[in-house]
Amino acid sequence: MQITEFLVPEQIAVGAVAGSKKRVLERLSELLTRGADDLDSADVFDCLLARERLGSTGLGDGIAIPHARMAGNQHTLAALVRLDQGIDFDALDQQPVDLFCALLVPEESAQIHVQLLAQLAEMFRDPEFCARLREAKDPHTLLEVLREWEQTSASTGIVD
């Protein structure tokens, strides 16, 4: 299972502006619910915010992976936002965050949730990969960078 199975260009924002943690979570919620007519972005926002209250999903090095399992949700969804300028997201290294990859899975999908989070963590540990995401000019290019990483990683056994 790979993140690009759940991510389309319409769920990616490149060069976005958000002045706060709340605003970027709202934007991610809007992107996550695109194409999922049975989900309300306000409910998704509440779910992501509740998870953030347990502890920041800001990994450091400008990366955050907001994620949640949601009751009543039947979809595994992903969204990606690259901000023009990083914001305070209570990251582990206390540095601004500019790359956000959100994940929303059905409440009963704990194993899928953990697998996708592990894949995202592995991706974002690669400084070259992150630099390429930051250089991407549009959602299609950004998605292609993700696909290339997945293909390379699959051939080396990182992703199954």
Image (cartoon, rainbow, N blue to C red):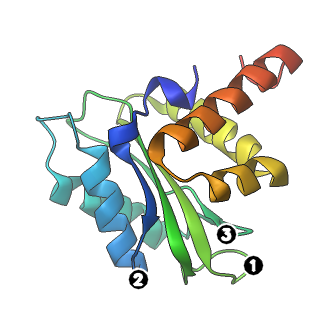
Residue at 19%, 34% in the rendered image: 36
Residue at 49%, 32% in the rendered image: 110
For label 2, the crowd category at 10 Å Cα-Cα, with few meaning under 14, some 14 to 19 and many 20 or more, is: few
State the residue in front, 9 or 28: 9
Classify residue 55 as left or right of residue 155: left
| Precedes in sequence: disc 2 or disc 3 | 2
State the residue in front, 1 or 109: 1
Q: What residue type is labelled 1?
A: Asp
**Dividing the image into 4 quarters, which one contains the N terminus?**
top right
Occupied quadrant, residue 148: top right
| Precedes in sequence: disc 2 or disc 1 | 2
Could you give the CA–CA distance between mark 2 and mark 1, rounded to whole angstroms? 17 Å
Classify residue 110 as left or right of residue 97: left
Classify residue 93 as left or right of residue 18: right
Q: Position of residue 46 (x, y in %)?
A: 26, 62
Q: Position of residue 39 (x, y in %)?
A: 16, 41
Disc number for residue 62: 3
Occupied quadrant, residue 10: top left
Q: Name the residue under label 1.
A: 93
- Which tag is nearer the camera, tag 1 or tag 3? 3
Tell whether label 3 touches label 1 (CB within 8 Å).
no
**Dividing the image into 4 quarters, which one contains the C terminus?**
top right
In the image, is residue 66 above or below residue 157?
below
Q: Name the residue under label 2.
A: 20
